[in-house]
């Protein structure tokens, strides 16, 4: 099991716990690829998925992981809850905890919400994305995908392209990659790079071709179109021209690189369809690894010591 009781973020998460989750994920990947596709290791455990923001991949992935492990899975939706009647987050959580749950998965728009949740419930808390802070389970599935593809993460050259400023995925990926010994370059327009990027221990450039020629793997980030009104980029067309993972750019490279994207993708903005659907892309592998890695996280945080994988 893990040293940690919760998975709130990767910045201060023990490297030994991170490696244990990654290694255990491969065991669950084997189970998912077997005819049975189940490992009843959390029978009798109750997990609540509390999503205060929209989600497709993450929510379905957690729900499926819980069911594959034999847990009782409850999906909470803020849009149909008493939150709409003015109930506070604290009261909502304490009422749910009073029903004797074993763990909670939370996605919320406010940074720190997952950490706050640990004050109100006794069970394990897993952060499924808190504002622009962190998205640790996405980073873990990315690490599983990289290790599966390359056999290692240490000394890999990883480029992260796009909206680093607002991306919780980028922050968690950077923390995970640094712990595991990768080299990282971030790239994007100056308006989408955080002022403390160098303090995160990464190199910075505004030249995407420079990154693509250097890296082993590139992670393209979603341009958050809902923030377009802030004027961070002049237009989708200009962003695509300057920072897009285009077929023209990738086809000119004298080597193969691995293409990743956490989704959802804006095809024709940060990535061309030809690239997203190419043999270089491992985007659908990331999705399957998301189920395996979340099974690993849930098992290592919630399983009784007598339940051996």
Image (spheres, rainbow, N blue to C red):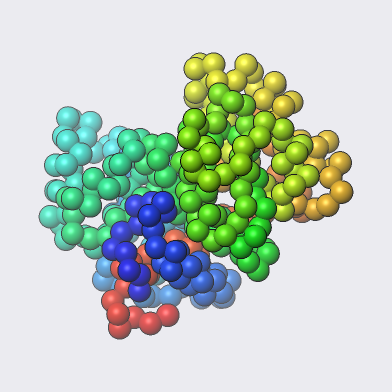
Residue 219 spot, x, y in % from top left: 63, 45
- Up the image or down, 201 lies above or below 126; here it is above
Residue 196 spot, x, y in % from top left: 48, 35
Q: How many marks?
A: 0
Question: What is the quadrant of the N terminus in the image?
Answer: bottom left
176 vs 289, nearest the viewer: 176
Task: Answer whether residue 94 is visible to the viewer in this image.
Answer: yes
Task: Answer whether residue 31 is visible to the viewer in this image.
Answer: no
Q: Residue at x 16, y 42 (%)?
A: 90
- Up the image or down, 157 lies above or below 263; here it is below
- Image quadrant in which you'd find residue 148: bottom right
110 vs 17, nearest the viewer: 17
- Image quadrant in which you'd find residue 122: bottom left
Q: Is residue 223 left or right of 132 when viewed as pictured? A: right
54 vs 16, nearest the viewer: 16
Residue 226 spot, x, y in % from top left: 49, 24
Q: Is residue 200 left or right of 300 when viewed as pictured? A: right
Q: Is residue 278 left or right of 21 when viewed as pictured? A: right
Q: Residue at x 37, y 41 (%)?
A: 130
């Amino acid at each position: 099991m893990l040293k940690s009781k919760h998975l709130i973020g990767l910045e201060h998460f023990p490297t030994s716990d991170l490696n244990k989750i990654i290694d255990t994920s491969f065991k669950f990947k084997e189970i998912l690829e077997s005819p049975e596709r189940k490992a009843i290791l959390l029978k009798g455990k109750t997990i609540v998925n509390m999503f205060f923001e929209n989600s497709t991949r993450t929510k379905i992935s957690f729900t499926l992981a819980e069911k594959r492990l034999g847990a009782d899975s409850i999906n909470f939706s803020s849009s149909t809850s008493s939150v709409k009647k003015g109930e506070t987050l604290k009261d909502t959580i304490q009422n749910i905890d009073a029903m004797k749950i074993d763990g909670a998965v939370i996605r919320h728009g406010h940074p720190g919400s997952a950490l706050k949740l640990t004050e109100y419930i006794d069970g394990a808390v897993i952060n499924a994305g808190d504002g622009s802070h962190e998205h640790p389970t996405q980073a873990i599935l990315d690490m599983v995908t990289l290790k599966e593809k390359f056999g290692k993460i240490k000394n890999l050259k990883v480029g992260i392209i796009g909206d680093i400023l607002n991306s919780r995925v980028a922050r968690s990926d950077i923390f995970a990659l640094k712990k595991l010994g990768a080299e990282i370059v971030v790239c994007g327009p100056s308006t989408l790079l955080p002022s403390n990027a160098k303090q995160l221990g990464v190199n910075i450039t505004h030249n995407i071709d420079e990154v693509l020629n250097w890296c082993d793997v590139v992670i393209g980030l979603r341009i958050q179109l809902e923030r377009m009104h802030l004027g961070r980029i002049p237009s989708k067309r200009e962003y695509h021209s300057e920072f897009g993972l285009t077929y023209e750019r990738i086809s000119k490279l004298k080597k193969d690189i691995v293409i990743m994207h956490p989704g959802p993708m804006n095809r024709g903005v940060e990535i061309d369809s030809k690239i997203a659907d190419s043999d270089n892309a491992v985007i659908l592998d990331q999705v399957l690894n998301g189920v395996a890695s979340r099974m690993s996280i849930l098992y290592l945080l919630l399983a009784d010591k007598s339940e051996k994988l």
